[in-house]
Amino acid sequence: MDPTGDQRWAVEQVLALAPRPSSVAGAQPLAVPARWSGLGCDERAVWGRCSGSSSEPYDAMADHVGVACRCTCPSRVVPCKHALALLLLWARGQVPTAVAHAHPDLCVSLAWAAALIGHVELVRPWLDAAEATLTDESPPLHGWSSLRAAARNVRANSGYLGNSDRTGAIADAEEAVALEADPAFAGCAVARMTLGRVLHGAGESEAAVEVLDAVMRLPVMAKTPGILRLQAAGALACALLDTGRVAEADRLCGTTAATADTLEERWGDAAGSALTLLRIAEGRVAYERGDVEAACPLLTRAVALARVCGDVSHLVLALTALAQAELAAGDPATSAATFAEAHITAKAESTSPAATRQLHAAEVRIGRHPPPVGRPGGSRPLVEELTDREMSILRALQGQMSQREIGAAMFLSLNTVKGYTKSLYRKLDVSSREAAVQRGRLLGLI
């Protein structure tokens, strides 16, 4: 029987999913209908609420086509004993048939589960199913005050992979933040973390640093699962590196190292969605410090994790960083092959603006590929393209507004505007406002 088909699995196939023998031992006592309420299944999913040894029942669900599981229990093992027990009940024919699409909260959970373990192709179908019946009164997911916010969050995080235009992702993330405003809920931190990650992917590194740094300081982050803190830390560390703050990124990687190592030891490649950006950041920090011997294995591992988690942009970022480290280590042939793979990957599927820019900038720095040609009669060409936000800042610099006034007009803090201006000056190779405007005009940017 094919586990990815629409036929019911055999019990042996379910047991083969157990990450360790103790998972089977824990699942067997729970695999009885009396322990469950709200049991249901359809041609794609199975779900239910388990009353176990804890005073709090746990909601478990599994996509038995994409083999994605999610449970509200605190276990970080996938599948946990509750999801394993649920699948055992389904395999034995002890779960009544129902329709998942009638339960928008279930559909959002299954979309989240699919994203978590790298089945990104399942995210949109489940979210589309949820949207069909979702209302403001729909019961929220555990840790959220709004189901609509959770749905927007999942779509922003994983529903636009393969689309280089991140406008929709940013809009969904901002809506999730607006809807999930109660700081008592973990969803408040998660929505803001997603906004920071989306901004980073769009190349808005300064804004991403501001958002993600604020997220890491929220009191509720101490209560959220470790995987979420690691995702936020990885995105923040990469954004810090993109803005030249190597020492801060190094400190952040150091504070999360033990937790990250423990998670990877337990989950292996399944930790890809949580650790890819963090491993990229660790490797980039080592490279910036001149320790290519440490950078190469870290970035090789980041590439492996990125392949599993299914985010093409993260894979391009990891390959780009690895290629530079390999060249610095004195292996130009391997570096060229890694750069070639990064190019092929980026062309085969749409990547984020940040990943594309980093690949191009890296190749320009090492001379693999000439920089873009400037306009005839203009100034020397840009080595690295300006982001949309940097273009907005450049246009604003033509006027008489101060940096504080520019920030107010764009809903940015003064420090964020200063950060964008610093990045803008670096890319334009200038040191003053007047020179930036003049060079922008020579290049035809304004």
Image (cartoon, grey):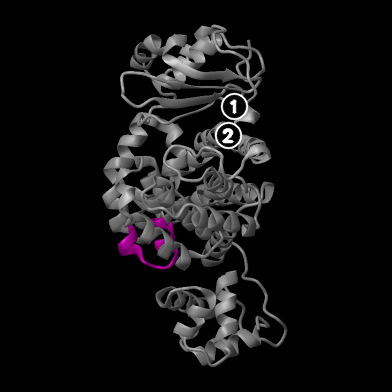
Residue depicted at x 43% and y 54% = 235
Quick one: SS at disc 2?
loop
Q: Quadrant of residue 387?
A: bottom right
Work out whether 199 lies above or below 270.
below
Helix, strand or loop at label 1? It is loop
Q: Which of marks 1 and 2 is nearer the N terminus?
A: 1
Residue interval drawn in magenta = 236-249
- Between 170 and 350, the one nearer to me in the picture: 170
Q: In which quarter of the image is residue 84?
A: top left
Label of residue 119 in the image: 2
- Identified at 43% across, 57% down, the residue is 238
Q: Which amino acid does label 1 sit on?
A: Gly
Q: Is residue 215 above or below residue 420?
A: above
Q: Does the magenta stretch include residue 233?
A: no
Residue 295, given in percent of the width and then of the height, sits at 37, 50
Disc 2 residue type?
His
Q: In this rendering, is residue 416 above or below 190?
A: below
What is the C-alpha distance between the residues marked 1 and 2? 7 Å
Residue at the extreme right of the image, as rendered: 376
Q: On the picture, is 118 further left or further right than 56?
A: right
**Residue 231 image position (x, y, % from top left):** 41, 47
Dominant SS of magenta comes to: helix
**For the point 31% across and 62% down, which residue is it?**
248
Q: Is residue 112 left or right of residue 375?
A: left
The N terminus, quarter of image: top right
Is-magenta flag for residue 238?
yes
Location of the C terminus (image quadrant): bottom right
Residue at mark 1: 66
Q: In which quarter of the image is residue 175?
A: bottom right
Query: Is residue 352 in view?
Result: no
User: Does the CB distance between marks 1 and 2 fall below 8 Å?
Assistant: yes
